[in-house]
Image (cartoon, rainbow, N blue to C red):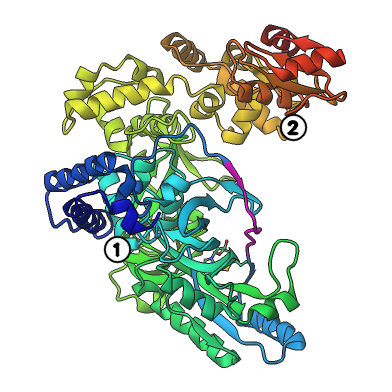
Amino acid sequence: MSEKDEYMNIDPAVVRRIRELRRQVEHHAKMYHVYDAPEISDYEYDRMYYELVHLEEQYPALDDPASPTHRVGGKVLDKFDKVVHAVRMDSLTDVFSFEELSDFLSHVRETLPEAVFSVEPKIDGLSCSLRYEHGVLVQGATRGDGVVGEDVTQNVKTIFDIPLTLPEPLTLTVRGEVYMPRPVFERLNAKREAEGLSLFANPRNAAAGSLRQLDPNVTASRALSIFIFNFQEGNLYADGHAPLTHTETLDRLAELGFHVLEERICTAETEQILGHIRRLGELRDNLAYDIDGVVIKIDKLADRITLGEGTNTPRWAVAYKFPPEQKITRLTDIQVAVGRTGVLTPTAILEPVRLAGTTVSRATLHNLDFIRERDIHILDYVTVQKAGDIIPEVVCAHPEKRDGRETEFHMPTVCPSCGEPVFREEGEAAVRCTNAACPAQLSRGIEHFASKDAMDIDGLGPQIVEALISAGLIRDAADLYDLKSEQVAALDRMGEKSALNLTGAIEKSKSAGLERLLYALGIRNIGSVAAAALAARYRTLENCMAATMDELCDIPDFGEITASCVVNFFSHPQNVALCHRLIQAGCLTKSTAAPTGDRFAGKTFVLTGTLPSLTRDQAATLIKAQGGKVSGSVSSKTDYVVAGEAAGSKLTKAQSLGIPVISEDDLRQMLA
Ligand code: IVH
């Protein structure tokens, strides 16, 4: 049906109004989410948006996949579906110096003496593929392991840089890097800080956390962007013309409405390649997005085929990684904080400086030895960088810049929190406060208990923990579960709604499961991996509490030190009492993970019909955890068919082949 026929019986004024509303809604949504510069009130926007929604419902013939109403409103998912990429999403070989880069260029020139390279920024975000069928966006997927990714279609539709439709009915897949622009990142973190939520370490983590959201409305509120850097497969032109170069491809993609990489050059000359890398390095700070290197790739597509692919990376491209960004700033003070285990950690207070995407004003100094080895004085100029691009650290001091006002730092002799004397054990770098009732240790312990990988209590940040302790409302983690929202609401700067949210989050944390709970307890040397191993071995908190040294030493990767930390922790009466109170409070103290074993090794199961309590996915997980296989169809190789209500042809086939048919109950008994 042509557009004209579709609209034939509809009042042209309606058609015009819908077009106008779509234009306006797209514009104002972008001003709000992307630029944080709304031009109209939320009320006016909502009226406009819902007028459009109603008109589209009234005139379904005028529905258009390009309408901004398709960007939002997706439903909250339980999990992401898996997507098998039609073309593998390879990663790149990294090089860390101009020498290594020159080796790559020489190697390429042995086969292709005239090779021309595209030299472009390496955007620091996450890779994503976009599939269009007949000009309509039908799928967005994360890279995953390069072969299988996750279906994030609803979420990518919320990204304004991504066209929902193309101006031509083309079927193609493109690949790009989803990123969070720096101003959006700053705003997001400022808002999270005000709400007492944990901060994202950098724009890349924020982008990843925002794209992999089961609720697309959260992604929409995060204003992500994308740069397209590759054409994966399909047709770029309706007449089947295939581009000859990467440059031609990106120009064409820009013409089709994609936001393609900026700041790229095309050259055959080594000097120009190196010059562009230097230029991008200088430009890096002033870009609105983070880059972590420069990609050097062959421009001519036929040449790429000549060079081919390695195991997981192409031979026609490399990523030159920038060395960690460093800045010089003044260290204005050294403050000492007391950690969860009583260790006193000195922290450098810095004159704020922009570093790798965030403003840095503190950096860890680890311990006194670290300070002495680097000859760091208070008021020194110091070089700072981010370790692993996340944690700021002091690299060195600049004694040549001293003006005489600098002073040497001394570790306090008493705990800055409780005033009790501190100790340094023989051969240890750390200085400790050993007072079990030290309030700072209590605060850090509760913050750890509430942290993301532990009980994941949203909104229980350091300030609230401090306020709850000062108000005498909590003395240990178990006290959290006795808190009433009225008590929380009575704290300074706490509204009723925030108090309800917090007590709701605390209640929810009860079902975190044994793995998280064991980690949350803060047993020395028990990180989340060791906690999961403990939970898998003992299944309940009570069993863990009774664990013996011999048993613990049998757990893979548990040495004597780790084992003794566990035994030691549960030998303290106050820790045992804490565990009993957590059990009484209703915390889930059983393992949520399927027990692993090999009970079903070599056995194939088929699941059919509706099982009384398990979903088919849950049943499959239980079977696989015992080494069994789950197949979609019944054959002579099937060992068991697990049948529920309304089982159909699979059940009949199993009966005709004489394969044992079992119920969910039978399966549970086999697992018990
Ligand atoms: S090309 C098969 N170009 O870097 C070649 N990748 O470490 C595919 N990236 O996973 C990569 N900017 O997500 C290419 N201009 C760019 C890029 C880029 C960022 C990411 C990409 C890839 C990772 C490789």
| Mark 2 and mark 1: Cα distance apart in space | 45 Å
> Is 242 drawn above or below residue 516 in the view shown?
below
Residue 87 lies in the magenta-colored region = yes
Chain-order first, disc 2 or disc 1: 1
Residue at (68, 16) in percent of width and height: 648
Residue 152: x and y, percent? 48, 46
Left or right, 197 with reference to 574 = left
Label annotation for residue 459: none
Residue at (80, 16) in percent of width and height: 654
> Is 246 drawn above or below residue 426 in the view shown?
below
One can see residue 476 in this view: no
* Residue type at numbered disc 2: Pro
Residue at (59, 64) in percent of width and height: 234
Residue matched to label 2: 556
Residue matched to label 1: 352
Rendering quadrant holding ligand 1: bottom right
One can see residue 194 in this view: yes
**Looking at the rendering, which quadrant does residue 482 occupy?**
top left
Residue 659 vs residue 51, the one in the foreground: 51
**Looking at the rendering, which quadrant does residue 309 occupy?**
bottom right
Mark 2 residue element:
loop
* Residue type at numbered disc 1: Pro
Residue 235 vs residue 454, the one in the foreground: 235
Residue 508 lies in the magenta-colored region = no
The quadrant the C terminus occupies is top right
Left or right, 466 with reference to 226 = left
Residue numbers of the magenta segment: 82-91
Q: Rate crowding at label 1 as few (under 14), some (14 to 19) or many (20 or more) other CA atoms within 10 Å.
A: some
Residue 599: x and y, percent? 80, 19
